[in-house]
Amino acid sequence: MTASRFTNFQDYGVGIGLRIPHYQHILEKKPVVDWFEIISENYMGEAGRPLAVLDQILEQYRVVQHGVSMYFGNTARPNRDHLKKLKALTKRTKTPWVSDHLCWGSVDGRFTHDLLPMPYTWEAVKTTARNVREVQDFLELPVAVENVSSYAEFHLSEMTEWEFLNEVVEAADCGILLDVNNIYVSSRNHGFDPRDYVNAVPPGRVAQTHLAGHTEFKKYILDTHDHPVIDPVWALYELAMQRCGRVATLLEWDDKIPSFEEVHTEALKANRFLPASAAAA
């Protein structure tokens, strides 16, 4: 695979999300971790404990920023005040890329605080790509868009979800945060083969992957991030790594959070599927 500005992070290995219940353990024990992912919005204030902890983390660890409120699929353009705060944080963390979700979430200033699925239309491709380009240009960093888990579909869609993702990233010239658990969740909810999705994604644009657990109900499964990764999702991750090479990998665990050691041990299972780095080859 030819390296690009989205795929040149092969030395990042396996990281975990930086979460409040683990602050004390990390600061006191200083465990060996490849990198931490932070939710950008949790650290965009001007002062306070989150930033104080983050500064201590940055003294020893690499940090990558992941957002939850950019809403690239909104018809409105990105909020400049938000972008200014986000850019200030990127200067602080020196994050090599920034990610957020391929979704929409607000209308006329009203925010749902949810990651709502897109209608897969050519008009939506155009609007979403415009917004991603604007964010990427403003931040002066590579941006990776993450596929979301979904529980509803639009009848007016003109293509599959993976075709929509591919069209957006080509039009925006951005990267992909490939969440294999979200692919699995959506495939079960909507009845498609998740391997078709993974096989359709352009490897040269995949900057990062996400792994997580989910909860299964009678009629659907929900992306809850409160369980270990199940075997079918590991199998999908293995397929993604075979296609994309050694991609920076992150385990998400955001509810019913167990000990640091348990989360980190679950994350390190990914090493079984990661190809050797180019430097080691």
Image (tube, helix red, strand yellow):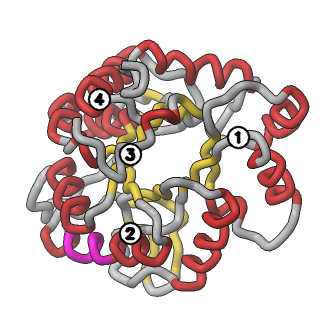
Query: Is residue 38 found left or right of 175 in the rendered image?
Result: right
Percent position of residue 66, x then y = 54, 54
Q: Which image quadrant is residue 142 in?
A: bottom left
Q: Earlier in the sequence, mark 2 or mark 3?
A: 2
Crowding at mark 4 (Cα within 10 Å: few <14, some 14-19, many 20+): many
**Disc 3 residue type (three-letter):** Ala
Dot 1 lies on which element?
A: loop
Label 2 to label 4, Cα distance in Å? 24 Å
Residue toward you, 181 or 239: 239
Q: Which mark is residue 61?
A: 1
Where is residue 20 shown, x and y percent of the image?
78, 43
Asked if residue 198 lies in the magenta stretch, the reply is no
Q: How many marks?
A: 4
How far from the left and from the top, in percent, is residue 101?
42, 57
Q: Nearer the viewer, mark 4 or mark 1?
A: 1
Mark 3 secondary-structure assignment: strand
For mark 3, does the 10 Å Cα neighbourhood hold few (<14), some (14 to 19), or many (20 or more) residues? many
* Residue with the mark numbered 2: 72
Measured in 3D between alpha carbons, the distance from the residue under mark 2 to the one under mark 3, in whole angstroms, is 18 Å
Q: Main secondary structure of the magenta part?
A: helix
Q: Is residue 132 left or right of residue 99?
A: left
Residue 214 pos. (x, y %): 48, 31
Question: From which residue to which does the magenta span run?
Answer: 125-130
Q: Amino acid at mark 4?
A: Ala
Query: CA–CA distance between discs 1 and 3?
Result: 19 Å
First reached walking from the N terminus: tag 2 or tag 4: 2
Mark 2 or 1, closer to the camera: 1
Reading the chain from its start, which is encountered first: label 1 or label 3? 1
Three-letter amino acid code of the residue under disc 1: Tyr
